[in-house]
Image (cartoon, rainbow, N blue to C red):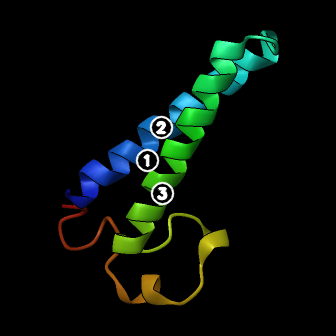
Amino acid sequence: MRQTEMLNNVTATGIMVQDLRLFLDVFPTNKKAMADFMNVVGEHNRNMLEYEKNYGPLVGSHDQDDRWVNNPWPWQNGGMR
């Protein structure tokens, strides 16, 4: 899977997590929404881990090394491919 596709998956599942979280704020006893939320959170975490394993950290709190400094930034060298 290409970097852009992996990042799109991270973004899409992140949006679903937020949407379900907002829905559960209004309907906290909805069991199906809670089950969907838990499934999507797991998928989002897997997507993030897979992306970070291949391309480096997405957010500063996950930085364990300085690999990101040595790679081109998205706006350099033609952007993400």
Residue 50 relative to residue 32: left or right: left
Q: Give, as a three-letter code, the residue at label 2.
A: Thr
Q: Are marks 1 and 2 in contact (CB under 8 Å)?
A: yes
Residue 76 relative to residue 47: left or right: left
Q: Position of residue 13 (x, y in %)?
A: 47, 37
Q: Is residue 80 above or below residue 28?
A: below
Q: Give, as a three-letter code, the residue at label 3.
A: Met
Q: Position of residue 33 (x, y in %)?
A: 64, 17
Q: Secondary structure at mark 3?
A: helix
Q: Is residue 9 above or below residue 65?
A: above
Q: Give, as a three-letter code, the residue at label 1.
A: Val
Q: Residue at x 50, y 64 (%)?
A: 58
Q: Is residue 22 above or below residue 9?
A: above
Residue topped by disc 1:
10
CA distance separating discs 3 and 1 = 6 Å
Q: Which mark is residue 48?
A: 3
Q: Residue at x 18, y 66 (%)?
A: 78
Q: Is residue 77 above or below residue 68?
A: above
Q: Residue at x 31, y 65 (%)?
A: 75
Residue topped by disc 2:
13
Q: Residues within 10 Å of mark 2 (few under 14, many from 20)?
A: some
